[in-house]
Image: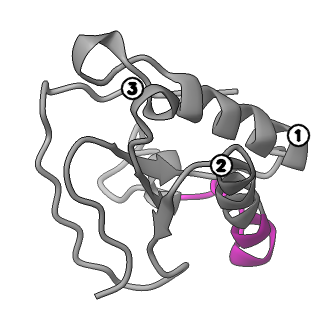
Amino acid sequence: MTGEITGPGLMVLVGVTHTDTRAEAARLAAKLWGLRVLEGEKSCSDVNAPLLVVSQFTLYGDARKGRRPTWQAAAPGPVAEPLVDAVVEELRALGAHVETGVFGADMKVTLTNEGPVTLILDL
């Protein structure tokens, strides 16, 4: 097993496109750390809740044409991996406990969603 969190926290799927920057990774980390979506309108920073960060290029899948999705909008690994790592580094610099998946791996991810709440943060 790679990354795992238990109890209240956030599972963060990070998709990177060609134009994303390190500055956006820092803004995303700050937003995630302070986002008030946990019980009682608390944030991870309020209750020291952990985050599981998983790279997810398929977030940029486009299935508007044909029957096969394309992932042309997703940045290639050499561009995306450093930016996913930057999100993790920035979160840790803010004091967050962060677990991660393995970049590019075929992972089995299990999630128990309380809410349910799913948000898209496009910074």
Q: Callout 3, which amino acid?
A: Leu
In the picture of the structure, the residue carrying the numbered disc 2 is 91
Q: How is the image coloured?
A: one colour
Confirm whether the magenta stretch covers residue 20: no
Residues at marks 1 and 2, CA–CA distance in whole angstroms:
13 Å
Confirm whether the magenta stretch covers residue 79: yes
Q: Callout 1, which amino acid?
A: Ala
Q: Is residue 116 left or right of residue 63?
A: left
Q: Callout 2, which amino acid?
A: Leu
Residues at marks 2 and 3, CA–CA distance in whole angstroms:
18 Å
Which residues make up the magenta segment?
Answer: 71-82
| Residue 15 position (above or below residue 36) | below
| Residue 65 position (above or below residue 87) | above
In the picture of the structure, the residue carrying the numbered disc 3 is 119
| Residue 120 position (above or below residue 68) | above
> Residue 23 bears which disc, if any?
1
Q: Nearer the viewer, residue 63 or 113?
A: 113
Residue visible at 52% across and 48% down?
Answer: 60
Q: Quadrant of the N terminus?
A: bottom left
Looking at the image, is mark 2 or mark 3 earlier in the sequence? 2
Q: Nearer the viewer, residue 110 or 96?
A: 96
Q: Quadrant of the C terminus?
A: top right
User: Mark 2 packing: few (<14 Cα in 10 Å), some, or many (20+)?
Assistant: many
- Observer-side mark, 1 or 2, equals 2
Q: Is residue 61 visible?
A: no
Q: Position of residue 37 (x, y in %)?
A: 35, 20
Looking at the image, is mark 1 or mark 2 earlier in the sequence? 1
Residue visible at 46% across and 28% down?
Answer: 120
Local SS, label 2: helix
